[in-house]
């Protein structure tokens, strides 16, 4: 089974935070993944810089993976660019901030 086979991959869960810096949004995210058909368990830390207007940007990620079947470790560094395709996703509705103030 090849890594690009959909049955190979499990969901990749991510969480983190971001901050607006001028015309960009900078995120630091952590993530984990349990491969569905192998013993691999992945974890990663990513940094993304997103242009606020185009939602295109750059990223780098550091991964450390472990295979529970073979007790093998793997590590990796990845970097690159990303480009928005398809419809845009709103970052927040205009009424979100006042609503959050009412909920707190």
Image (cartoon, grey):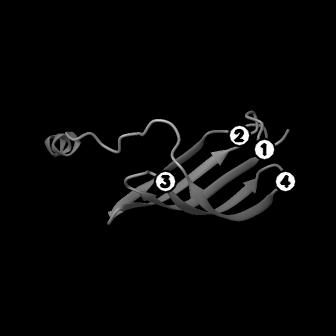
Q: Secondary structure at mark 2?
A: loop
Q: Do residues under tags 3 and 2 come within 8 Å of each other at their CB atoms?
A: no
Residue 30, given in percent of the width and then of the height, sits at 53, 56
User: Earlier along the polypeptide chain: callout 3 or callout 2?
Assistant: 2
The span from disc 1 to disc 4 (Cα, nearest Å) is: 18 Å
| Mark 3 surroundings: few (<14), some (14-19) or many (≥20) residues within 10 A | some
- Residue farthest to the top? 7
Would you say 60 lies left or right of 1 here? left
The N terminus, quarter of image? top right
Frontmost of labels 4 and 3 is 3
Circle 2 is placed at which residue position? 9
The span from disc 1 to disc 2 (Cα, nearest Å) is: 7 Å
Q: Residue at x 37, y 55 (%)?
A: 52
The span from disc 3 to disc 1 (Cα, nearest Å) is: 26 Å
Q: Residue at x 67, y 39 (%)?
A: 10
User: Earlier along the polypeptide chain: callout 1 or callout 4?
Assistant: 1
User: Earlier along the polypeptide chain: callout 2 or callout 4?
Assistant: 2
Q: Nearer the viewer, residue 81 or 4?
A: 81
Q: Quadrant of residue 50?
A: bottom left
The span from disc 4 to disc 3 (Cα, nearest Å) is: 39 Å
Circle 3 is placed at which residue position? 56
Circle 1 is placed at which residue position? 3
Q: Secondary structure at mark 1?
A: loop
Circle 4 is placed at which residue position? 70
Would you say 82 lies left or right of 94 here? right
Q: Quadrant of residue 9?
A: top right
User: Earlier along the polypeptide chain: callout 4 or callout 3?
Assistant: 3
Q: Secondary structure at mark 4?
A: loop
Q: Do residues under tags 1 and 2 come within 8 Å of each other at their CB atoms?
A: yes
């Amino acid at each position: 089974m090849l890594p690009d086979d959909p049955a190979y991959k499990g969901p990749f869960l991510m969480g983190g935070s971001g901050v607006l810096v001028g015309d960009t949004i900078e995120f630091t995210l952590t993530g984990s993944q349990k491969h569905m058909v192998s013993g691999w368990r992945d974890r990663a830390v990513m940094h993304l810089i997103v242009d606020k207007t185009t939602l295109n940007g750059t990223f780098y990620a550091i991964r450390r993976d472990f295979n529970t079947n073979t007790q093998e470790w793997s590590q990796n560094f990845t970097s690159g660019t990303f480009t928005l395709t398809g419809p845009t996703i709103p970052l927040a509705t205009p009424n979100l901030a006042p609503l959050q103030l009412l909920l707190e």
